Image (cartoon, helix red, strand yellow):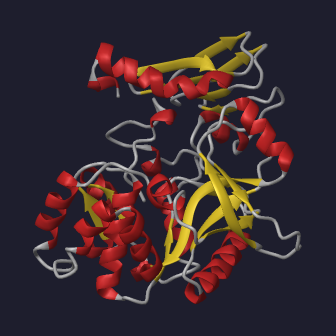
Amino acid sequence: MAGGVGSRFWPLSRNAKPKQFLDILGIGKTLLQQTFDRFTKVCPPQNIIVVTNESYVKQVQEQLPQLKADQILSEPHRKNTAPCCAFASYKIMAHNADANIIVAPSDHIIKNEKAFTDVLLSGLKFTAANDALLTIGIKPNRPDTGYGYIQFIDDKKKTKNKISKVKTFTEKPDLEMAKFFLQSGEFLWNAGIFLWSAKSITKALAQYLPEVNDLFEAGMSHYYTEKENAFIKKAYAICPNISIDYGVMEKANNVHVISADIGWSDLGTYGSLYEHMHHDENKNAIVGKNVMAYETKNCVIQMPNNKLVVLQGLDDYIVVESDNVLLVCKKDSEQQIRQFVSDVKINKGESFI
């Protein structure tokens, strides 16, 4: 899935070029390219499909030239993840009704890729043999309010890549609730990575989201034909805006979670980026060749190489400049960045977004 705008990473991430198309870690590959490479260890490149907004198709083609045209699915409108999953699942079914599917965002970090591959192979074995919807869960190490949480039924058995029945989903709790979840030991972070067979997910969509399912099931005779594009434009114009988590996963009774220790981050905020960057002796994570920091510590600083920046006396701040925008805010207030973006859009216009 590569259609999001990544507003919590503004101003680095912009509407015209969101974070999945950026080399945000400075390693020579964008997040999308890293994700593609990661999945070639699990399936052949010709079986990888990228679903993105129609305005980003050219960027996907430029960054992943090995993809054929029918491997890039173009969404005419942003309607959240349920339509995205339905579109991709039915198109895959038109090619192979017995397909086993992994759904993953294109902008996550996975540090332990071997462990991730092992988890995926275990999960695919499970979903091939069971009518189940499987999600990857990450053991939380802090009471983070930016993640969804999965409560699982613990059978107390200690097994590698353990798969458990899901009891409840909770989306982005407040701090006190997140602390309780962490202390209970019964909750995992929802990584937003799903595994299921094409038959299982379309069955679940038909049961829990028929208003989405029926639209995309009706296109079975159009996929991989010249009629597909016009059909998808009509479907997206009328389909509801809803996430797969809320529309299906929170309602279905055959949801399972596989607990994974894979060095995962959804890289959704500057705080999560900070954890994956090199820190200097004052615990600053600095990108930019001409940054001079005095009595400054615990900061995320991202500056253009041609900009001389002198900072003094900052502790636990985000300082980011990109194009025509400079952002300075407290690290513990980063969840407000979406509100900043909304206010900028209203008061200053689209050119800054």
Kindly tell me whether residue 152 is visible in this rendering: yes
In which quadrant of the rendered image does the C terminus lie? Answer: top left
Q: Is residue 73 above or below residue 191?
A: below
Q: Is residue 271 above or below residue 314?
A: below
Percent position of residue 143, x then y: 76, 38
Q: Nearer the viewer, residue 169 or 263?
A: 169
Report the front residue among 251 and 336.
251
Q: Position of residue 251 (x, y in %)?
A: 52, 60
| Quadrant position of residue 344 | top left
**Which percent across, then down, holds residue 161?**
76, 74
Quadrant including the N terminus: bottom left
Q: Report whether 177 appears left or right of 154.
A: left
**Left or right of residue 53: residue 199:** right
- Give the x, y percent position of residue 106: 48, 57
- Which residue: 31% across, 86% down? 95
Q: Would residue 127 be found to the left or right of residue 281 on screen?
A: left
The residue lying at 41 percent from left, 24 percent from top is 341
Q: Which residue sits at x=31%, y=18%?
A: 346
| Residue placed furthest toward the top | 313
Q: Is residue 12 left or right of residue 334?
A: left
Image label count:
0
Any part of residue 65 in sight: no
Task: Note whether 39 is above or below 235 in the view shown.
Answer: below
Residue at the image position 74 percent from the left and 29 percent from the top? 284
